[in-house]
Image (tube, rainbow, N blue to C red):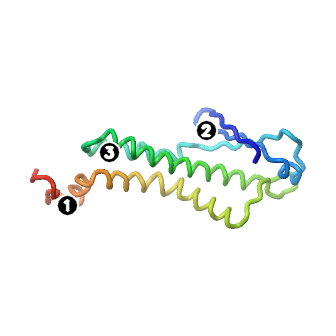
Amino acid sequence: MERIKTSRQERTLVFQVEPNDSTLRRNHFRTGVVIDVPTNPLQHTFGIAFFLALLLASRPAGLAWKAVAGCAVLLALASMGLACDVMVRLGSLAAPSGGPVFAFNAAAREAIALGYQLGTLIFPTVIPVLLWGAMNRAALEKFLRPGVAPPDQGVV
């Protein structure tokens, strides 16, 4: 890939990919071809709202730093999932000859597929709960053992 530009259209991000010279020659494309790859960032970022809802509902001490730190972690994971989504879409493009436009080796295809699955299924759903539990142990203890007071607090 020679160059990638990003634009936003309604609820999608469109990555405009310009193939490098060897890809252009291999697929018999003319110079200046740009391939548009649309992707939906909401598939990867809904975990941020989920995390913030859990955090706000439990009202922990240090809410501001926990919200910022948790959102930063989730945003980093969402960007990895978004990148793998773009790579999956690029890998599935076919040239006029019928072959793939961008040829990835087997290990790269497996890594991209794993990253895509993690980025769309696991990271947005599981990581917010784990982050919330790690940042708010008192609420987690109260939830798991309703009749027992957390060790650092008195009986409510």
Separation (CA) of disc 2 from disc 3: 28 Å
Residue found 45% across the figure and 44% down from its top? 72
Could you tell me which residue is drawn at 48 percent across and 57 percent down? 122
Label located before the other in sequence (1 or 3): 3
Q: Secondary structure at mark 2?
A: strand
Viewer-nearest residue: 58 or 77? 77
Disc 1 crowd, CA 10 A, few/some/many (<14, 14-19, 20+): few
Circle 1 — which element? loop
Q: Residues at badges 2 and 1 in contact (C-beta under 8 Å)?
A: no
Could you tell me residue 119's position as x and y percent?
54, 54
Q: Position of residue 66 (x, y in %)?
A: 34, 44
Which percent across, then down, holds residue 152? 15, 55
What residue is shown with label 1? Answer: 145
Q: Earlier in the sequence, mark 2 or mark 3?
A: 2
- Residue 80 - label: none
Q: Amino acid at mark 1?
A: Arg
Label 2, label 1: how many angstroms apart (C-alpha)?
43 Å
List the residue tagged with mark 2: 12
Instruction: Examine the rendered structure and indicate whether residue 64 appears above or below residue 114.
Output: above
Q: Which mark is residue 55?
A: 3
- Residues at marks 1 and 3, CA–CA distance in whole angstroms: 19 Å
Check contact, mark 1 vs mark 3: CB within 8 A: no
Placement of 103 over or under 56, stated as above or below: below
Residue 85: x percent and y percent?
62, 51
Q: Name the amino acid type tagged 3.
A: Leu
Q: Amino acid at mark 2?
A: Thr
Q: Residues within 10 Å of mark 3 (few under 14, many from 20)?
A: many
Residue sticking out furthest to the left:
155
